Image: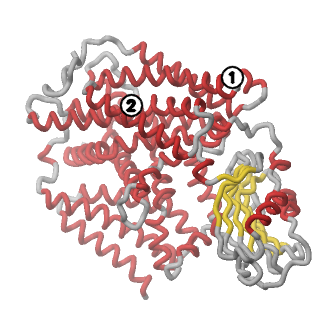
Amino acid sequence: MNLRRHNVYFHTHTISGIFIAAVLYVMFFAGSFAFFKDEIAAWQNDASGKHRPYASTVVFNAMLDSLDGVHNLHGRDLSFTMQPNSFRAYVGIQPSKDTVNNDKAAEQHFFNYDFHKGETGTYASSYDLGEFLYRLHFLAPLNEVPIRIGYPFGYVVAGLVSFLFLFALLTGLLLHWDKIVSNFYTFRPWSKWKTIWTDAHTALGVIGFPYQFMFAVTGVMLIIGSVLVVPFSKALYGGDEAAVYRDLELPYYLTPPSEFFSKPLASKPDIDHFVQRTRALWPHTFITSISISNYGDENMHILMTGEPATRWRFAGQGIVCYRVSDGTIIRHKPAGQAATYLDKVKSLVYRLHFGDYGGYPLKVVYFILGLLGCVVIITGILIWLVARDKKNVPRHKRVFNFWAANVFVAACLTLFPVTAFSFIAVKVNGGGGMDFIYRTYFWSWLLLAAFYVLRRNLRQTNKETLLLGSFLSLLVPVANGIYSGNWLWVAYQHGETDILLVDVLWLCLAVVGFMAFLRIKPMAAPRPVARAAPRGST
Amino acid sequence: MPAKKKYLTQSPLVRLLKITAGFFGGYAVSVSLHLLLARFFNPADVLITAYFSCIILWAVLLLLAFLVDKVWKIWLIYALLTVAFCIPLFS
């Protein structure tokens, strides 16, 4: 073993790790729930996607008729981004190119549309806990912090944290490389605290390594892909970033021919007809986006993209473009067949990160591995603290270390009860838009975390958040039963597996939490970490 | 048992130079290498591959900056590599 290298790995691992620990914990915790984004949305709105046939529910003509009545669609470009596994779409309506005959030409609209209910909602009102936890996991709420650096602040932080996470993973692996096999089998739970945490950190870190490595790499690219796209666009595309994304075949940037002929179509466009044709062209495929250019014009086109069902094919985005006037197909790349290299690698990036290629069993495994990641982070913080709690460390440093760990642990561990509490709150409240969820989640988090920070007792923080979280978890399915009438057995009878899954997930968390709580022994308490710090920790 | 100090960089300036060399220099080397590859292969294919390879390489280069003993060496190596990879782009 090269001692110098070993110490360099050790130090860089420690510093990068402690730097990102708290934020990374939030990302892992919220991210683990985000695997069930759609299920949580179904749970909150009590609208299961399981027993309503998709094809008969997602109907465009009636919707476009009503939109036409309100916004006058003539000459506009429209885009529909379909939400996977749901009946919802983000809708974009661009200004009309016909400024003469369309009196609302300058207007522009973006909103959510629920095909099942036939309702239009603003983004904020359609916001649910699934969306919230999904966006929290890449720190989107931080974007509202008024720090202007030319890129959304929260995303920059999330990207930087992911990258440092990757770095910490590499150094961690190298650090343990020589002893990786023996460490894997080492767990000494009756030893002193530092040994327990070190063993847990190492064993779980090694088991979770491939998973965490994959998330670090794909995570960096999904959140700050600009670090690559910007230099590529500058060097090879003359600065046109949209052209880069078009070459990557990202659905939003694939647009049909846009030239406006200013000559109305002979008959009213029948979008559903084209949707049916696409469905016939591509079996087992979910249409991910529909982009319409020049609505009602002679040069109207419809472009659709689709992702094959993962049971059928892992990769292979389909693209088809129709000219509406005569129904000819002007571009076609079949879904699921002849997947290009680009398709395959792109599917790897997205599918590995979203865990959407193996049904619920895979998502549950991902969820557990995600929470194990949280354990690795917490044990890392504790090792860092205990390793520095020595007599030869100056007092002011020990006090600082204790407070850092105290704040980190309080902020991290309170997430469990706070998340369970928010699930109950949206049910009691009978729904919850962005405002309600933000207020509930962030205030309860702040208050609870502040309480434990002031309490200055890591052991109590751990015990009490575990107990409180487990108790609230137990109430989540109960709240669903009382306020939506959808008790576990009701959901089971109706085959609403998505709603059932969320309830069962919380039930399992409650059981595991209670078991863990009961196994916390009234052990000979760990030595006080810094003399100034703990109150009543003996 | 924090890492032993005698093996670590002592001067804050040298440490800062190592971090910046690894972070910015590593980024420049990794991105310029992939831009070079995009000259020879389909740019979209290179870019999507870079989603994995460029990020991993960047992290490895960040680590290398800490392992090399003299900080000027790493600045020199990263600068030369970046320039070398960029030459075909402007020729």
Identify the image quadrant of residue A346: bottom right
- Judge left or right: residue A328 versus residue A220: right
The residue located at (24%, 56%) in the rendering is B66
Towards the viewer: A324 or B43: A324
- Judge left or right: residue A237 versus residue A406: right
- Report crowding for label 2: few under 14, some 14 to 19, many 20 or more residues within 10 A (C-alpha): many
The residue located at (39%, 79%) in the rendering is B86
> Could you say which disc has been placed on residue A248 in the image?
none
Q: Position of residue B39 (x, y in %)?
A: 51, 78
Indicate the quadrant containing the N terminus of chain A: top left, top right, bottom left or bottom right.
Answer: top left
- Judge left or right: residue B19 versus residue A268: left
Towards the viewer: A422 or A26: A422
Please say whether residue A180 is visible from this viewpoint. Answer: no
Q: Which residue is mark 2?
A: A413
Q: Which residue is mark 1?
A: A487
Which amino acid type is shown beneath numbered disc 2? Leu
